[in-house]
Image (cartoon, helix red, strand yellow):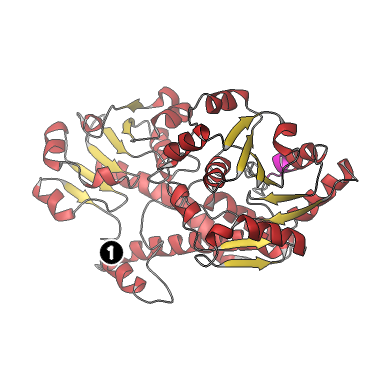
Amino acid sequence: MKIGIIGTGYVGLPTGVGMAELGNEVVCIDREQSKIDALKAGKITLYEDGLEELFNKNIKAGRIKFTTSMKEGVSNADLVIIAVGTPPHPVTHEADMKYIHAAATELAEHLTNYTVIATKSTVPVGTGDVVEQLIKKKNPKAQFDVVSLPEFLREGYAVHDFFNPDRIVVGANTERAANLIADLYKPFKGKTEMLFVKRRSAETIKYASNAFLAIKIHYINEMANFCEKSGADITEVAKGMGLDSRIGNRFLNPGPGYGGSCFPKDTMAMSYMARQNGVDMTLINSAINGNNARKQQMAHRILEAVKDIKDPKIAVLGLAFKEGTDDCRESPAMDIVAELLKHKAKITAFDPKAMDVAKSILGNNIEYARDMYSVADGADVLAILTEWPEFKTIDLGKIALLMRNRNIIDCRNLLDKQTAILANFKYKGIGR
C-alpha cells in the first residue's frame, strides 16, 4: 500500500517506520526543511527505543522516504495519515487545530485517486467532519473518506507497541474505508482486537482512555500521601490493589505526577469539550488540579531536605517525562526543576537521553553533568525524577563519597530504602 504520513514527530515517525517495516511504500512529509534534511541523511530526529535500527533498515530497503512536498507524499497514495501536533491553546487549553486544518486544506488539492484520510493525531470529537468539509471545499471532485485512527503508542515503547498493539480502533463511516484499513492491518489479524466504530466514537475513545489513566495516576498519588501519614507502604498497597482483575496493576506507580505530550494535553482538552457540551467532568478536573499541585509538592520536598544548608546544591537524575524517550514536553521533572529555580536553587542534572532537549528549554539556568555519578559531586541532595533503569543500579557507596550531604529524595521509588540507609543516606521515597 502507498502511504503518505504528514508529520514526523513522536507519532508520525514511529508510525511511518512501522508501516514501512510491514512492507508498505511510505512517504513522510514535514514542513521543517532541517528535519527532512536530517532524515534524508539517515539521522534520526528523536529517540525511541529500537527505532533507529528499523529506521536504517527501511531506508536501505527503499520503503520509506522523506520530503517537504505535500504533492510528492499525497499524490497516488492509498492512505494519508495526519500525525501533526494538536498543542493546547494557551488560554482555553482546548486542542489547537490549526495544524490539522492546514494539513487537510493543503493535501486536498493533491488527491488524484480514491484516498482514505486518517487522523492519527489526538483530535476533538467532530474533527473528522471538519476535515471532510475542508477537503470538499478545496477540492470538490476529490474521491476520499475520512477515518479516525487513534494512536495508542506509549512514548519510550512506541516500536514495541506498534507491532504488539493491545487494540486497533478504527472510526469509519463507510464500508469502503473500513475495508482499506482492515487490509492495512492484515498482519495483525488474529493477534489483536480490531474495533470498528463510528468516527466520533473513535475520536472519543482516545480522550476517554487517556483521561482515565491520568485519573488512575492521580488516585495512586493521593493514596501515597495517605500512606505516608498513616504508616502504610504504598508499594504494598498498590500490589494488593493490582491483584484485583477489575483494577489491574498498571498505572499504580506513585510518583511526581503524570506528564508528556498526551495526558496533560488530553485531560485539559477533554475538560474543555465537556464544558462545551454542558457536562461537568469532576474527576478529570480534580486530576488536572491535583497533578499540577503534585509537582510543586515534590519540589518543596527537595527544598525541605536542604533547608538548613547554606547555598545548597541539588543534583537531579532524570529530565525526560519518562524512561525510554528524550521527550521533555510537560515533563514533571522539568516542572519540578522550574519550581526549584524560582527558589534560586543551584541545580546540576543528568539524563541518559534528554540532555540536548532539556538544554534547549532550560538553557544555562542549570548545570549539566556528563554521567549519573558526576551529577552528585558536591551535592547536598540527590533527587530522582525519571525512572531510567540505570538509575536503579547506581552505586550508592560511590555516590556517598561524592556528595557533601547525604540526602536522597526518590520521587520514583527506584532505590531500595534499606540499601540507602546502610550507605548512611537520609532517604525519602513516595508513600513509604
- Residue 129 to residue 240: above or below: above
Quadrant of the image occupied by residue 26: top right
x and y percentages locating residue 136 in the rendered image: 87, 47
Q: Secondary structure at mark 1?
A: helix
Residue drawn at point x = 75 percent, y = 33 percent:
71
Q: Which residue does the image show at 13% across and 36% down from the upper left?
A: 398
The image quadrant of residue 232 is bottom left
Residue at image location 33% in from the left, 27% down from the top: 368
Choose top left, top right, bottom left or bottom right for residue 209: bottom right
Q: Look at the image and tell me whether residue 247 can be seen.
A: yes
Tell me residue 353's x, y (percent): 37, 35
The residue nearer to you, when weighing 312 against 145, is 145
Q: Residue at x 46, y 57 (%)?
A: 164
Residue 311 image point, x, y percent: 26, 29
Residue 426 spot, x, y in % from top left: 17, 47
Decide whether the magenta segment is chiefly helix, strand or loop.
helix
* Span shown in magenta: 96-100
Looking at this rendering, what residue extends furthest in the right direction? 140
Which residue bears the numbered disc 1?
235
Is residue 349 in the magenta section? no
Amino acid, disc 1: Thr
Q: Please indicate whether residue 209 sits to the left or right of residue 113 in the image.
A: left
